[in-house]
Image: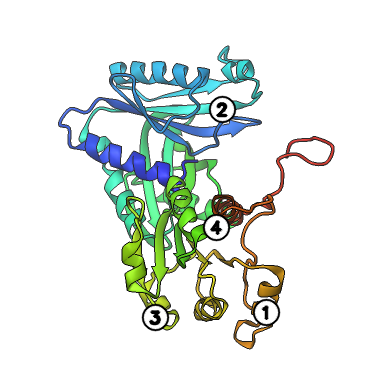
């Protein structure tokens, strides 16, 4: 599926396109994958009339073929489902050495109303709401113009499906199988059997870096490159004003006792405390101990971390200390890389180990 950064890029491009009275583009969506593929279900690429793309899928042979077929659906105006496997004669994944199979939905975008769902999706992201989106793309195995449903909890934010039976079937399927990744379902509706892609929609990850150390400053451009919404926090306003922040990053002046009020923290947030003053670090950590964040970490030697864990106000805290994966980091830039890698592993539910086991087999 697309990362939050990619999704934000796609949303911006689609909103721009929707202002055109006669748009001409196509949206390519991976709806099913099997085996080893370059991306997973839910990943999208926007193809424009001149053949340029927004959010590349692979850059290789499959992408060139997908672009060509997307240009064709712009001409005939009908959506199409393309299978890439050995049986179809489109085994470009085999040629690349991937060995997997996938199905791609090609959706022509030839009128502003084809992008009506984008505003609701953009609002959801801006409000940092976790939601789900369902896309019906076939009825009784015949490809149809995609119909979408976007909802958050019990609130429906957008609906172009208009079939109560399908909607209920989607809700029931997700309730019994609360998948964290996109899944293609085959469900019953009033018009027949429908194929629907259901996917989670999460806001961009937010990283809060507390401190003015060299490692803290080195972490800022790394987080920015990953598309994380990054905030630098310090208790000293003069020091904050003197720091040349990368574009798009914000600075917040907040002492430990004010940090919770100053920061909108949620389950899609991470905090790293890096002030190099142990008493101040512990004060910030104590203030954040019950914060609803995905990751809370701090730098430190074995002795420093031991002192933190022995402090009564930090007893039982869920803390990554010292923060970062064990990659032999020494310089601020290497430490920043290790910390960012551990945060990514945590939010993706991974161990952070190698992609292969001791015998060389790939996970």
Tag 2 or tag 4, which sits nearer the N-term?
A: 2
Mark whose residue sits in front, 4 or 1:
1
Nearest the eye: 89 or 259: 259
- Report the Cα–Cα distance between label 1 and label 2: 52 Å
Mark whose residue sits in front, 1 or 2:
1
Where does residue 142 sit, x and y in percent of width and height? 44, 26
- Whether pointer 4 and pointer 1 mark residues with C-beta atoms closer than 8 Å, the reply is no
- The reply, left or right, for residue 322 in relation to residue 25 is right
The residue labelled by disc 2 is 102
Residue 237, by quadrant, is: bottom left
Where does residue 82 sit, x and y in percent of width and height? 48, 22
Residue 96 vertical placement versus 153 (above, below) = above
Tag 1 or tag 4, which sits nearer the N-term?
A: 4
- Mark 2: which secondary structure? strand
In the displayed image of the protein, which residue is found farthest to the left? 21
The residue labelled by disc 4 is 175
Residue 71 vertical placement versus 142 (above, below) = above
């Amino acid at each position: 599926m697309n990362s939050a950064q990619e999704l934000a890029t796609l949303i911006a491009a689609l909103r721009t396109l929707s202002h055109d009275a006669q748009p001409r583009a196509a949206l390519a969506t991976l709806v099913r994958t099997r085996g080893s593929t370059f991306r997973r279900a839910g990943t999208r690429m926007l193809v424009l009339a001149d053949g340029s793309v927004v959010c590349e899928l692979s850059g290789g042979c499959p992408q060139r073929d997908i672009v060509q077929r997307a240009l064709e659906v712009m001409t005939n105006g009908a959506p199409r489902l393309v299978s890439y496997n050995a049986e179809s004669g489109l085994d470009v994944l085999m040629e690349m050495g991937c060995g997997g199979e996938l199905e791609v939905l090609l959706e022509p975008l030839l009128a502003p109303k084809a992008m009506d769902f984008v505003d609701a999706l953009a609002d959801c992201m801006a409000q940092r709401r976790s939601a789900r989106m369902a896309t019906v793309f076939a009825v009784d195995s015949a490809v149809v113009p995609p119909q979408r449903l976007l909802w958050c909890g019990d609130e429906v934010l957008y609906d172009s499906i208009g079939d109560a039976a399908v909607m209920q079937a989607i809700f029931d399927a997700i309730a019994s199988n609360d998948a964290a990744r996109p899944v293609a379902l085959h469900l019953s509706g009033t018009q027949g059997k429908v194929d629907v892609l259901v996917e989670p929609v999460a806001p961009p990850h937010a990283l809060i870096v507390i401190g003015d150390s060299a490692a803290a400053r080195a972490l800022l451009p790394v987080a920015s490159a990953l598309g994380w919404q990054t905030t630098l926090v310090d208790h000293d306003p003069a020091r904050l004003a003197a720091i040349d922040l990368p574009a798009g990053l914000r600075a917040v002046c907040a002492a430990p006792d004010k940090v919770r009020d100053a920061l909108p923290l949620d389950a899609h947030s991470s905090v790293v405390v890096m002030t190099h003053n142990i008493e101040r670090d512990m004060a910030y950590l104590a203030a954040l101990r019950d914060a609803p964040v995905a990751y809370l970490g701090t730098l430190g030697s074995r002795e420093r971390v031991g002192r933190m864990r022995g402090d009564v106000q930090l007893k039982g805290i869920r803390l990554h200390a010292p923060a970062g994966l064990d990659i032999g980091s020494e310089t601020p830039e290497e430490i920043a890389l290790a910390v960012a890698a551990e945060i990514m592993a945590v939010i993706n539910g991974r161990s952070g180990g190698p992609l292969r086991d001791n015998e060389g087999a790939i996970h």
